[in-house]
Amino acid sequence: MPWVDIIILVVVIIGAAFAGLYFLNRWSSKQMANQQRMIASTSQSVSIYVIDKKKDRLKNVNLPKAVVEQMPKRASLMKMPLVKAKVGPQIVTLIADKKVYEALPLNKNTMVNISGIYITSMKKGQSR
């Protein structure tokens, strides 16, 4: 096999790999945009009292069984930023965005945007 044929074969394989990655990126971008739209549509502002925050696996935390079953398998293996907070009269465990997790103050009332059990953002200057 001449060296020109080998170079052409390598270029074709690399081109196919880049094309596959391009279409995979477009598909995942569409999925991410749909998820962000859904999170924004169900978001609500709530005042919470942050009791504790830690990074732990979902199976080690007291979450409803339905929530754990709906999570992807890779999410159950990862450590996630979790916040134990008092929302109204209930004490619940919430999953926080990484940026929000870093900014949440402990043992203070804070206004946050919540979508289900996911804390999406924190209101600036609203912690008391």
Image (tube, grey):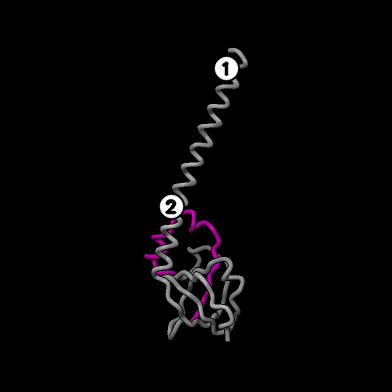
Q: The N terminus lies in which quarter of the figure? A: top right
Q: Residue at x 43, y 82 (%)?
A: 90
Q: Nearer the viewer, residue 81 or 30?
A: 30
- Magenta segment: does it hold 76? yes
Percent from the top left, x then y, of residue 113?
48, 75
Q: CA distance from mark 2 to mark 1?
A: 38 Å
Q: Earlier in the sequence, mark 2 or mark 1?
A: 1
| In the displayed structure image, the side of residue 64 where residue 9 appears, left or right | right
Percent from the top left, x then y, of residue 40?
43, 67
Magenta residues (range)? 63-86
Q: Residue at x 53, y 67 (%)?
A: 97
Question: Residue under circle 2?
Answer: 30
At numbered mark 2, what does the secondary structure look like: helix, strand or loop? Answer: helix
Outermost residue toward the top in this view: 1
Q: Residue at x 50, y 36 (%)?
A: 19
Amino acid type, callout 1 = Asp
At numbered mark 1, what does the secondary structure look like: helix, strand or loop? Answer: helix
Question: Residue under circle 1?
Answer: 5
Q: Nearer the viewer, residue 127 or 50?
A: 127
Crowd class of label 1 (few under 14; some 14 to 19; many from 20; radius 10 Å): few
- Magenta segment: does it hold 109? no
Amino acid type, callout 2 = Lys
Crowd class of label 2 (few under 14; some 14 to 19; many from 20; radius 10 Å): few
Q: Residue at x 44, y 47 (%)?
A: 27
| In the displayed structure image, the side of residue 98 where residue 39 appears, left or right | left
Q: How many marks?
A: 2
